[in-house]
Amino acid sequence: MSWLALTLVAFVIFVLVFFVKNRQLNHPALQYPYRLKAPLFSPAERELLEMLQRTVGERYLIFPKVSVADVVEVTAIARRAYWYRATNRIAATRFDFVLCDRADLKPVCVINLHDPDTDEEFMDRLYETIGLPQVRLPADAARSYSDVRKPSSRRCSPDRPLAGMSAAADGHKSA
């Protein structure tokens, strides 16, 4: 008889825990666990955006925080696993700023703030492979008009061929 009572008590406790947890998981805050992030840009990104608008805003459209997968596509790979690996590698990465030609919106140049968490070797090879020049600036360069204008005009010039560009701005490549 005691085993039956113990089993019945355990079952009742299990049912109560199940209903309490189920009710908690159905709470509206857990169904849609999203909220607006503010601000959209870090202070360095905002300063760089303002500086880019002053320096190259008349020649190019400036698109901030562009997913690499929106600009780069994975070419045909024989094995599906390699294709997924290549796609996942670019899906989670973003460009800080993409400068596009005003006429056809073709990407002309990428400007990134130096981020120690980024796999710069992979990104450098990617820029070289797709033929898209990159300007990598330290975060403090966003405060100086000349530090933004000089490398961006040198690397993102419209008369410069895109193929074969080196991957980082002169004098701004981090070691």
Image (cartoon, helix red, strand yellow):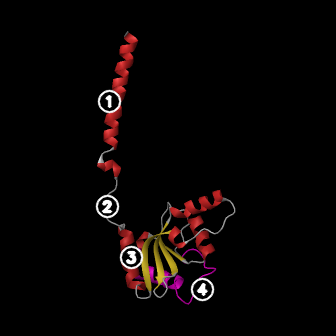
Query: Mark 1 to mark 3: distance in Å?
Result: 55 Å
Query: Mark 1 to mark 4: distance in Å?
Result: 69 Å
- Seen in the picture, residue 9 relative to 85 is either above or below; the reply is above
Question: At numbered mark 3, what does the secondary structure look like: helix, strand or loop?
Answer: helix
Q: Residue 137, image x and y in percent? A: 47, 73
Residue situated in front as seen by the camera: 36 or 49: 36
Q: Residue at x 62, y 61 (%)?
A: 83
Q: Residues within 10 Å of mark 3 (few under 14, many from 20)?
A: many
Q: Residue 92, image x and y in percent? A: 50, 61
Q: Is residue 151 magenta?
A: yes
Residue situated in front as seen by the camera: 114 or 32: 32
Question: At numbered mark 2, what does the secondary structure look like: helix, strand or loop?
Answer: loop
Q: Are marks 1 and 3 in contact (CB under 8 Å)?
A: no
First in sequence, mark 1 or 2: give its number: 1
Q: Are marks 3 and 2 in contact (CB under 8 Å)?
A: no
Which numbered disc, 4 or 2, marks the residue closer to the eye?
A: 2
Which numbered disc, 1 or 2, marks the residue closer to the eye?
A: 1
Question: At numbered mark 4, what does the secondary structure look like: helix, strand or loop?
Answer: loop
Instruction: Give the magenta part as a residue range.
Output: 142-170
First in sequence, mark 1 or 3: give its number: 1
Q: Would you name the residue on which mark 4 appears?
A: 161
- Mark number for residue 36? 2
- Mark number for residue 16? 1
Q: Would you name the residue on which mark 3 appears?
A: 49
Q: Residue 10, image x and y in percent? A: 37, 22
Label 1 is placed on what type of residue?
Leu
